[in-house]
Image (cartoon, coloured by chain):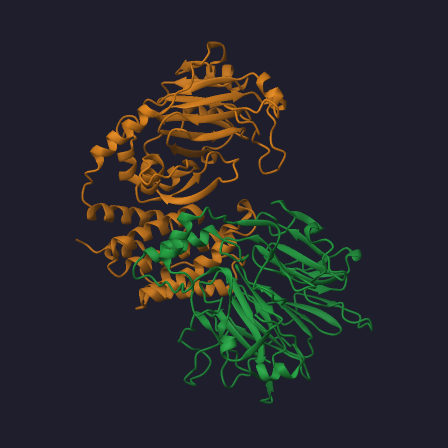
Chain colours: A orange, B green
Amino acid sequence: MASLWSKISPVLPANEDQFPLKFSDKVELSVVEMLQQSRKQLYGDITSSSRLLNAQIILDISWEKLNTGTWRHVDKEWRRVYSYGCLFKVAALCCESPSEDKILEAVRTCDMGLIMGAAIMGDILQVIVRILQSHIRTLSSTKEEDESEHAEVKRIKIESPLVSAIKEESAVLRIKCPSLESFKTNFLLPLKPVILEGIIDHWPAFNKHPWSIEYLRSVAGCRTVPVEVGSRYTDEDWSQTLLTVNEFIDRYVLNKDGVKALGYLAQHQLFDQIPELKDDIRLPDYCCLGEGDEEDITVNAWFGPGGTVSPLHQDPQQNFLAQVVGSKYIRLYSPEDTGKLYPHQSQLLHNTSQVQVENPDAERFPEFARAPYLECVLQPGDVLFIPVRHWHYVRSLELSFSVSFWWS
Amino acid sequence: MRWFGFGFNAFGQICVQEKSGRGESSSAPHQVKISHPAELSSHVDRSRCCLKTSQIRVSWSRRASLHLEGDSCLSLAGFGESVSSEDCGISKIESRGCKDVFISESHLTLAFPDRIETWDLQKREKSPSWSMDIKTDAEGSDVNLPLVPGGYIALKPPFYCTLPGHLKARSLALGAEHAVLLTATGAVYSWGLGSHGQLGHGGLTSEEEPRVVEALWGMPMTHVATGGWHSACISDGGDLYVWGWNESGQLGLPSRGLRKSQQKTSQQTGELCCDTSTPPDEKLKEEEEHEDVFISIQAFPALLDVSSSCEIRAVSCGSRHTAAVTTTGDLYTWGWGEYGQLGHQTVTSSDEPQRVEFFRAEQMRVLDVVCGTWNTFAAAVKEEVACAENSTKCTC
C-alpha cells in the first residue's frame, strides 16, 4: 500500500520556488520570515519535530490575530496565515509514516484550517483532508457496531416526549409544490410562514444516500466540528467546543459516557467543510426569488439529539428550514408582536427574546401570553419558510438533522 | 543590575547561539524556547565599552534595550538585527540621546528630550514615519511612552491620539485592542474592545472613550499593565488586581480550558508533559470530586493573592501570561507557558502563580519585570547588593 506521504506530496508544489507565499503588509515581515522558514523545511531534510515547532509558531501568532477584534473584522490575510500554519503542520505530521493518531491529528488540523482559516493554494486543505480520509478508510476494518447502534438509536427515538396536538387555528399552513409565482404572491411578499411539502423529495439525502448516524460516521466521522453545549445559548453555562463527529455522536446522541448535558451541532457551515454532504442536498429553487446572489446564501447544518432548543429569536434574512431526519416543534411569532416578546436589551442578544417559550414566566413577561403565534411539527421532507425577522423557537423532538438556507 | 530572559527566542531576541565566527549570516537556528532564565549578554558600544541596560521593551520578535548612562542610546535584538563580533549591533536608526522607547511589532517610538519619533520597522526608511517636537519644560517629563504631551502614541497610524486634559495621565498600557490608563491621582481608566472583559467595567461591551474603572474607585493604584486580552494593576498597598480573559490561566484564576488540555496531554503517551506540580491522576480526581468553579472571563477587577502576605511592586503582561515582582525580590509567573515564558523549566501553562526559583537559587533579588508577547525579562541584583540598600523583608 502506498505511503501516506506519497499521496500527499504530489498535491504540494514541486519545489520551494513554486510555493507561493504572498501577503499584504498587514502581515509583519517577522511572521513572513517564519513562513519562509517552514516552506524551506518542507523541501529540506528537516526533522518532523523541528517542522512542527515552526508550524506551531505560525499557528500561535495567527491564532492570536484571529482572536483580536471582532471576527467580522479579522483581516483575511491572518486567516490565510493560519491556513498555511495548518498546512505546514499537516505536512510535518504526515511525512514520517505516521500512526493513526497522527493522521487523525492531521485531519483535525485540516479542519481547524477550514473552519478558522481562509482557502489557500486552491483550497489545498480540502484536497488533503480528502486524501487523509480515504487513507484512514483503507486502514480501518468495517465496524461491527452498526447493529447495536441501530438499536440504540431506535430506543432513543421511542423514549422522546412529543408535543401536545397542534390546534388547527394556530397551525402553519402546508402547501405541496407551489409554483414560484404562487409562493411569491401568497407567502414571500406578504411575509407569511408556510410549510412547503414535496420540494426536497429529490434530495440524495433521502434517496441515494439516506442520512443516518452510520452514514454520517462514514462520511464525516473523524472530522472536527463546533458543538454547542448547554440547554440554550442564553444560559450562563452554555459553551462551545470542538469535537469530531464521532465524539459528538458518541457523547451527545448516544450518551455513551453518561454525560447529562445537551450538545448541538448548530449553525455550522458543514457543507462547505464536507463536500460529500453538500452533494446530498440542493438549493431550493424558490431562493431565486430573492435579490441576492446564490453565493451569498448561507447554508447551515443543525444536527443533534432530541431536546435541543433554539430560544425564540429573529434573523435578518429569509430562511428555508429543511427537515431531513427526525422532527422538530417550531413556534413562530410575527415581528409586529415584538412588543410582547421582551427582547434582551444588550447589543449581543437584542435579536433574542427573554421568554422561555414553553415555560414562560407570566410575572416577568405578562404580555407574552397574549401574543398570537403559529406552530407546527416539522417532519422529514418538510421545508418551513420563516420570513425575514419572524421570531422563531425550535425544539427537537428526537434525533434531528435540519438544513437551513439564509437568503435575501 | 543584570537582565535575564526566558520564553520565545525564535529570532534570538533573548540570546543567540555561539557563532563559529564566520560572519553575520547564520544557518544555525536560534533555540526557540528558553524555559530557564538566561542572562542577557551585555551590550558593547562602538568604543567597546560595556553599556548597562537600564530598561527593556519587547515586542513579538524583538527586544529594545535602553542604555541611559552617559550618551544614552538604544540597541535592538531579534528579528532583522544581526549580532556578530564585528557589528556593535546598534540599529541603523540614530538613537543617541533617547530617553525612552516603545516598541510594537511594526513600529519603534523613541523619545528624545526635544522630540518624539516613530520609525517603521518594516520599511527601513531614512526618516521617521511620524515625529513631534516637545518643549523641554522644567516641570519634568510629560513623556512616559506611550504617553506624550497631550495624548499618546498608538500602535499603528495615525499614531498620535489625544487624551482629555483633565485626566492627568501618569502611565499608559496598550494591549492589542485595549488600553488602560493610570492617572496622577491613582485612578484607572480603560477603553477599546471589551469582548473578553479586559476593560474591567463588568460587561463585554467596548468603549470608545476612556471610562473609569469604578470597581477600583477610591483605591489609589500605582502601576497598570495590559496583555493581549487581560489587564492588571497594583494598588499603593501592594495588592494586585487582574481582569479580562483567563483562557490560559493568565489571571491566576482556575481555568477550565487549561485543565482540559492538561488532562489530554497526560493521557497521551510519549507526549512532552513537564507539569511537575500536581500528578495527572490527582488532577483528574480533583475535577471529579469537586464542583470546581472555573473562570474564563473576569469582567470586574479581582484581587489576586500572588503569594500570601507579600506586596507586589511590579507587574507586566505578555499576550497570555502575567509576571509580578514582590517587594521581597521574588518573581512570580502564571498563564500561558508553552514557550517557556513562565521560567519554570517547563513548557506548560499554569493558572496558579508560581515563583521562578532560579533567582532564589542564584541568591538574586528581582527588581523589575518586563514581558514581551511570549517571553519574560527580569532585572535582578545579587542579594548582597540588595542588602546594602535598606529594604523591608517579610516572611514569605
Q: Please, is residue B132 above or below residue B20 in the view?
A: above
**Res. A339 in view:** yes
Q: How many marks?
A: 0
Specify the farthest residue to the left.
Answer: A1
Task: State which quadrant residue A328 falls in.
Answer: top left
Does B93 sit left or right of A167 as displayed? right
Q: Please, is residue B13 above or below residue B159 in the view?
A: below
Q: Residue B62, position in %: x, y? A: 54, 70
Q: Residue A51, position in %: x, y? A: 36, 64
Q: Residue A190, position in %: x, y? A: 55, 17
Nearest to the observer: residue A304 or residue B82: A304
Residue at the image position 62 percent from the left and 81 percent from the top: B386
Does A67 sit left or right of B312 as displayed? left
Residue at the image position 44 percent from the left and 18 percent from the top: A376
Specify the farthest residue to the right.
Answer: B138
Nearest to the observer: residue A92 or residue B172: B172
Does A404 sit left or right of A24 as displayed? left
Specify the farthest residue to the top.
Answer: A169
Nearest to the observer: residue B93 or residue B212: B212
Q: Residue B388, position in %: x, y? A: 64, 84
**Res. B124 in view:** no
Q: Please, is residue A344 above or below residue B163 in the view?
A: above
Q: Please, is residue A69 above or below residue A211 in the view?
A: below
Task: State which quadrant residue A389 falls in.
Answer: top right
Specify the farthest residue to the front.
Answer: B395
